[in-house]
Amino acid sequence: LNVTTMEVTFYIAALVAVLSTIMVITRYNMIHALLYLVVSFLAIAIVFYILGAPFMAALEVIVYAGAIVVLVIFVIMMLNLKQESVEQEKKWFSKNIAIGPGVLAVILLAELIYILVSSDSPSVQPQQVDAKGVGMSLYGPYIMGVELSGLLLMAGIVGAYHLGRQKKKVV
């Protein structure tokens, strides 16, 4: 077996993505799951970069690890308006919750530094894809999927807000 270093980094990033995604699914606490979700998105971005898609890796970090996670945090903050929620959040944000995601993130950081300083090039050569090409693809043949996913996200936020308000009125 002739395994290159890029294949090893791919498998490590894929393993981190799978482990952190399993942790997202199995966590009862939303904040803990969110920390693992960020690590999962970063691992997927490294996989995209190794496969020769640096633009997709950047979009993964900006759109998913940035915007979507901030949106989820906003919804959590919007629904937890009571005083006991503040006390519960203080318990959730202990120093121990960052150990798992921190270890996985350090593995990804070491891998990224190795990729950037090594002389090995990715096994698949990157193609030049500009933002206009991505936009034309998304708003061309895939316009219906983009619009439906936007409506689905908005319906989820409105539904969560409505359920949160109903809970406050009943209690």
Image (spheres, helix red, strand yellow):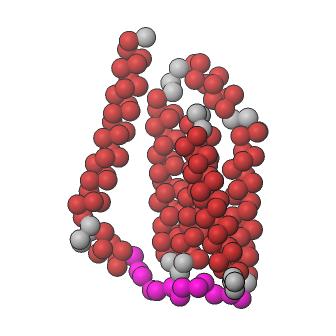
In the rendered structure, which segment of residues is drawn in magenta?
119-131
Horizontal and vertical percent position of residue 74: 48, 40
Q: Residue at x 58, y 40 (%)?
A: 26
Q: Is residue 31 visible?
A: no
Q: Quadrant of the C terminus?
A: top left
Q: Is residue 120 magenta?
A: yes
Q: Quadrant of the N terminus?
A: bottom right
> Which residue lies at the image location 69% right of the left edge and 58% below the top edge?
105
Quarter where residue 116 is shown:
bottom right
Image coords of residue 3 (percent x, y): 69, 82
Residue 97 forms part of the magenta stretch: no
Q: Main secondary structure of the magenta part?
A: loop
User: Residue 7 appears at what percent x and percent y?
Assistant: 65, 78
Quarter of the image for residue 119 reads bottom right
Give left or right: position of 130 versus 99: left
For residue 120, above or below residue 36: below
